[in-house]
Amino acid sequence: MFWSMVLPFKITFYLFLSIVILVTIFKPFFNWSRTKSFVISFFMTIVLFIPSCTGIQIIVDNYRFGEFKYNDYTEIKDLRIKYNLPQKATEITIYKSNPIYYAKYKISKVDLDLYVDSLWIDENQSLSIRDKADKIVIKDNFNYQFKDTSWSVAQNIIILDGPISSNGAGSTYYFDHINNMAYQYTCYW
């Protein structure tokens, strides 16, 4: 849940730790005692920590969230995405936010079914729990689910539910059988 704040926190912490150490070491430039240099820089760090952490998070989020395109699965470096994405996916578009990502990719229905079945097995859940019958989703429901993206479908599509992990993470897969295109909605912590 708080994973997106860890990197900005670490960057801010080590940045301010370096500043406190440098100010304390190079105290002659300020004509202060070492103790005074440490105390002043330490209290400035405490006061500025949250605003600085917020600013760093805004900068970092611009690089790690948004829309990304990949030719195939091997190009993806984010493990949170790779964990719930079929390896046979091609022409991948990811729209990533916190703590959700949407994916759109080409894959056959057989490969997607095999992948979803493997997820159920990996989660040590019985395949009998998984509803094997193709369920049709009305296109308006799909368009609402993917409203944060610019994606829409012209016809009703098939839905496949993935298992829910013990930490609450899970995926729902939508399959457009006319275009062999899968759409995925994934939440993770």
Image (cartoon, rainbow, N blue to C red):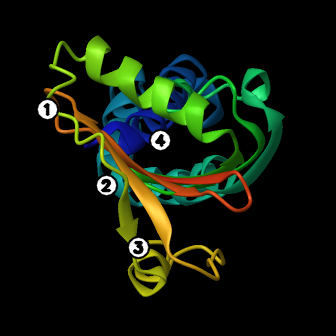
Sequence-first tag of 2 and 3: 2
Asked which quadrant contains residue 23, the reply is top right
In percent of width and height, residue 171 lies at 36, 44
Q: Which of the two discs, 3 and 4, sits closer to the camera?
A: 3
Label 2 and label 1: CA atoms lie apart by: 53 Å
Pointer 4 residue: 8
Pointer 1 residue: 129
Answer whether labels 2 and 1 touch (C-beta < 8 Å).
no
In percent of width and height, residue 113 lies at 47, 33
For badge 4, the amino acid type reads Pro
Pointer 3 residue: 145
Label 2 and label 4: CA atoms lie apart by: 16 Å
Sequence-first tag of 3 and 4: 4
Label 1 and label 4: CA atoms lie apart by: 40 Å
For badge 2, the amino acid type reads Val
Asked which quadrant contains residue 149, the reply is bottom right
Instruction: Give whichever of 128, 144 is nearer the camera.
Output: 128
Sequence-first tag of 1 and 3: 1
For badge 3, the amino acid type reads Gln
Give above or below for 132 relative to 186: above
Looking at the rendered structure, the secondary structure element under dot 2 is helix
Give above or below for 188 relative to 79: below
Label 3 and label 4: CA atoms lie apart by: 30 Å
Pointer 2 residue: 47
69 on left or right of 127: right
13 on left or right of 19: left
